[in-house]
Image (cartoon, grey):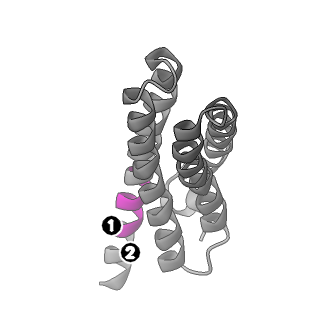
Amino acid sequence: MRSEEVGVDRPGIVERSVAYSLRIINLYRELEKDGVGRILGNQLLRSGTSIGANVHEAQGGQSKADFIAKMSIAHKEARESAYWLLLIRDANLVSANRIGDLYEETEQLIKILSSILLTSKTGRKKDAK
């Protein structure tokens, strides 16, 4: 199931998730210099890069249900990433300015993924009728 089949700008979310992963990797490199930063950064690295991996995997989904399952995981990982970014910011591991844009992008990804899921699930219900 390809995302353009459910009304999604495929290159947009795919490319955006890759760019996001690269930003997470760069932040992790800054965080690994501190013990607590390394631990929180590792959690963020896992969840933040998982978003793109699941978005990419969804593009080759074997069915609409498979597409929805992978996008649901990407959505869950985006929400988890937002949590780790808040902890990193509030623990003063990096400046709020450094986290601000990345947190905003996380929120945007959550909204995009929510929209993809809503569109996909609504279409799925119509297909079942």
Q: Main secondary structure of the magenta part?
A: helix
Residue in view at x 40 percent, y 50 percent: 79
Find disc 1 in the rendering and name its residue.
122
Find disc 2 in the rendering and name its residue.
124
Left or right side of 76 for 46:
right
Residue 33 image point, x, y percent: 66, 32
Q: Which residues are magenta?
A: 115-122
Residue 68 image point, x, y percent: 47, 70
Q: Are marks 1 and 2 in contact (CB under 8 Å)?
A: yes
Instruction: Say what amino acid the circle numbered 1 marks.
Output: Thr
As drawn, 91 above or below 118: above
Q: Assess whether residue 113 is covered by the magenta stretch.
A: no
Q: Quadrant of residue 76?
A: bottom left
Residue at the bottom extreme? 128
As drawn, 66 above or below 116: below
Quarter the N terminus occupies = bottom right
Residue 48 image point, x, y percent: 56, 48
Q: Assess whether residue 120 is covered by the magenta stretch.
A: yes
